[in-house]
Image (tube, rainbow, N blue to C red):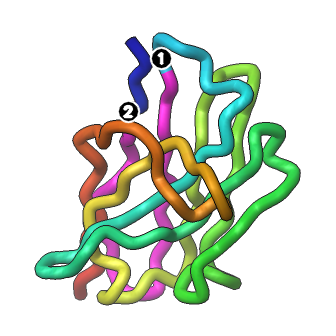
Amino acid sequence: QRQLVESGGGVVQPGGSLKLSCAASGRAFSRDALGWFRRAPGKEREFVASASWTGGVTYYADSAKGRFTISRDLTTNTLYLQMHDLKPEDTAVYYCNVVVGDFTQPFGSWGQGTQVTVSS
């Protein structure tokens, strides 16, 4: 059984930073492109960023460009999302998942996610 577990969320002030982690267990995911998604209160889940299986190719939503950086560590099977200059509109539950197609389409079940709250 494959499993992706998100962590690293928290409460941060506007302008602050957080680094999210997504640990893969079970199936290795080492050959899968992986991505981050988020769901803000009252909104649909949306794509944030994704990385190819090597991490060498990355994609970002316009809202994440210049502020967020996605990376992965194949040795530990962990996906990261470094977030800087956080804004209140970044408040959401963040999820990781396999991505397919144009690297923005999720594939597979969702985990619990990790809550990010940006508030003064």
Question: Residue 23 colored magenta?
Answer: yes
- In depth, the one of 114 and 61 nearer the eye is 61
- From the image, tell me which residue sits under label 2: 5
The numbered disc on residue 25 is 1
Q: Where residue 87 sits in the image (x, y, percent)?
A: 40, 88
Residue shown at 56% from the left, 53% from the top: 35
- How many numbered circles does the render carry? 2
Q: Is residue 27 above or below residue 15?
A: above
Label 1: element kind: strand
Q: Residue at x 66, y 83 (%)?
A: 65
Whether residue 55 is situated above or below residue 88 in the rendered picture = above
Viewer-proximal residue among 98 and 114: 98
Which contiguous range is marked in magenta? 5-24
Q: Which amino acid does the dot numbered 2 rest on?
A: Val
Looking at numbered disc 1 in the image, what kind of residue is underneath it?
Ser
Q: In the displayed structure, does residue 46 sit left or right of residue 25?
A: left
Tell which of 72 and 57 is nearer to you.
Answer: 57
Identify which residue is drawn at 46% across, 77% down. Answer: 16
